[in-house]
Amino acid sequence: MDRGTDVLVVGGGATGVGVARDLAMRGIDVTLCERGGLGSGTTGRSHGVLHSGARYAESDAEGARECIAENRIVKRIAGACVRDSGGYFIALEADNPDYFEAKLNGCRELGIPAETMSGTAAREAVPALAEDVERVIRVPDAVVYPSRLVAATAESARQHGARVLPNAPVTDLHTENGRVVSAAIDHNGGEMIRAEHVVNAAGAWAGRLAEKAGIELSMQPTKGVMVAVEDIAVKPVLNRCRSPADGDLVVPHEDEVVLGTTSVAVDDPDEYPTETEAVDRMVAECAAMVPDLADREPNRSYWGVRPLYAPDETDRDGARSISRGFFLLDHADDGVAGISSIVGGKLTTHRRMAEAVADHVCETLGVDGTCRTADEPLPGYDDSAKLDDLVGEFVTDSPADSDLRA
């Protein structure tokens, strides 16, 4: 079966559904396809933190500004997709006090709300904290439920006219005269979709999709483990106030906490080793902040792969040095028109990433349109039951918040 659409978006994670929503709200005919259930890639395997920007305040001012702006927008439009937990950056006796001051000053310079607390005051608020907590910075971090966020965004796209196709992998991209003109997808016995423009929002798999059009896209996916432990009484997101390292994050859920994470480069985003030692290390490292975690048996663990873009960065020391910012690439610059890729980024900034893509696509197609995604609430934002019905329709695999869905 042959179909036509203005824009084909490939990839149904937070960014992909965000692109489909934004374009549909501007009156563009959009089709979105995802090889599995929506959010089944990096989005559904994240730690689920809606960053305030504090994590990047001393090292990446631009990224931190984007995070605090999007933190406020997502809280406003996504409602019950978010648990407004607040966050603590925790300095232990062994941690560098200069780093704490740099973090605090960075937050204040960038307009990120930040209040200091003594270790005693922090333990009164969160008794599970370690005795050697010296100081804490309180910031507006939150927990986002990826399955609800993705499902609600997809429903908004659909309500504005988009066609949303889970379980519809792209098997090929076809080019004519140096331009991508159509895609073959495995849906309902096979479809050929002709499009004026293709958006590659396939995340860690973006390089593989680009190859189908003869484009080389330099991705360096990195794997990270998240470990869930039940019956730990923590309400805010806990961040170790030190340079990013393994085991510096504790994320509160309904009846468990999720501990993270590692960052190890992998060659294949589908096939990579999952070491038991990494799981044990997460528990041991996070127990420095929350001693009740020590020697606890994890309830579950899951791995995710980050979609890091890595050109001209091979000389940097290790995967953690690769940029976590996002990159919008028009492959006309590579000699293949009609296709753009959005890579990198964070779950927190997915809406902003989608806006940048939609602006670019509208300019490319000569379409006038203004972004409204920051103003219009998502469907079901104030109705948890409706959100979970949408999750049941669109999402099949999201371990980041499977405890909520259970």
Image (tube, rainbow, N blue to C red):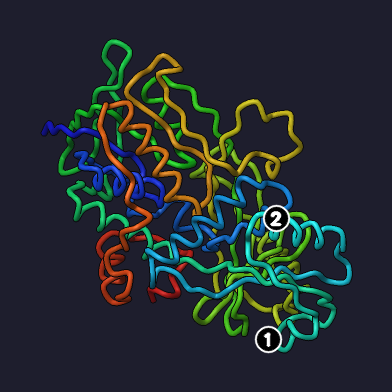
Tell me where residue 245 appears, x and y as whole percent. 74, 56
Mark 1 Cα shell of 10 Å, populated few (<14), some (14-19), many (≥20) = few
Query: Is 97 rendered above or below residue 323?
Result: below
Q: Can you see residue 346?
A: yes
In the image, taking residue 230 as reference, residue 169 lies left or right, namely left
Amino acid type, callout 1 = Ala
The kind of secondary structure element at disc 1 is helix
Q: Classify the position of the C terminus by image quarter.
A: bottom left
Left or right of 188 in this view: 58: right
Measured in 3D between alpha carbons, the distance from the residue under mark 1 to the one under mark 2, in whole angstroms, is 27 Å
Density class for disc 2 (Cα within 10 Å; few <14, some 14-19, many ≥20) is few
- Give the labeled residue for mark 1: 125
Residue closer to the observer: 47 or 144: 144
The image shows residue 150 at horizontal and vertical percentages of 36, 58
Name the kind of residue labelled 2 in the image: Glu
For image coordinates 75% across by 85% down, the residue present is: 121
Query: Where on the picture, by quarter, is residue 148?
Result: bottom left
- Residue corresponding to mark 2: 109
Residue 280 in which image quadrant: bottom right
Mark whose residue sits in front, 1 or 2: 2
- The answer to whether residue 273 is seen in the rendering is no
Residue at image coords 40%, 18%: 332
Q: Earlier in the sequence, mark 1 or mark 2?
A: 2
Quarter containing the N terminus: top left
Instruction: Determine which of the numbered discs, if any, sits on residue 38 in the image.
Output: none
Residue 393 appears at what percent x and percent y?
25, 63
